[in-house]
Image (cartoon, grey):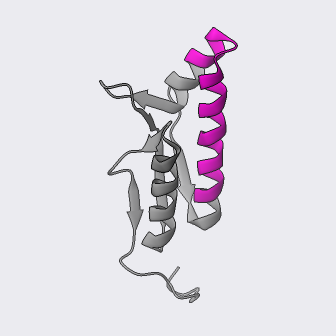
Amino acid sequence: MSTVTVQLGQCGNQVGHELFDIICSDAQEGQRKVYTTASCERFFHQTTDGDLIARAVLIDMEPKVINQSISRAARSGRWRYGETAHFSQKQGSGNNWANG
C-alpha cells in the first residue's frame, strides 16, 4: 500500500523533507531486505532509470519554501520530489494572516 504525504506550510515541508531523508537512508543501508523493500514501495516510486521520487504533495504560500525543499532533496542525490507535486502562490502572504 502506498502512502502519500501532504506537506503543508514551512514546518510541514521541512519535517516532510527530514522524514523522506531518514526513510531513504534506512532503505539504502539495506540491513533488512523486507524493511528496505517495504519502505521504498510505500514512500517512493522509482523511475525507469532507478531514481526515487517521493510520494508527496508540497503546499505553501511562498514558492521560496517549496523551492528550498525541492532543491535540498535533489542535492542529496538519493531521492527527489516530483516535478509537479507542489502548489504555491506567486508571492507569499507577507505575515498577513488574512492572506493565509
Instruction: Residue 87 in the image: state x and y as whole percent.
Output: 39, 62
Asked if residue 49 is positioned above or below residue 76 in the image, the reply reads above
Whole-percent x and y of residue 75? 48, 49
Relative height, residue 43 to residue 9 (above, below)? above
Residues rendered magenta in the picture:
13-37
Q: Is residue 28 left or right of residue 47?
A: right
For the stretch drawn in magenta, the main secondary structure is helix
**Residue lying at 55% horizontally and 54% vertically, measured from the top left:** 7
Image x and y of residue 42, in percent: 53, 26
Looking at the image, which residue is at 65% across and 43% down? 19
| Residue farthest to the right, as pictured | 31
**Is residue 3 visible from the viewing direction of this image?**
yes
62 relative to 50, above or below = below
- Between residue 32 and residue 45, name the one nearer to us: 32
User: Extreme top residue here?
Assistant: 33
| Front residue of 78 and 42 | 78
**Total numbered circles:** 0
Which of 2 and 34 lies nearest the eye of the viewer? 34
Q: Quadrant of residue 95?
A: bottom right
Magenta stretch encompasses residue 78? no
> Percent x, y for residue 61?
48, 73
Q: Is residue 28 magenta?
A: yes
Q: Which residue is found at the position 59% from the left and 50% from the top?
A: 17
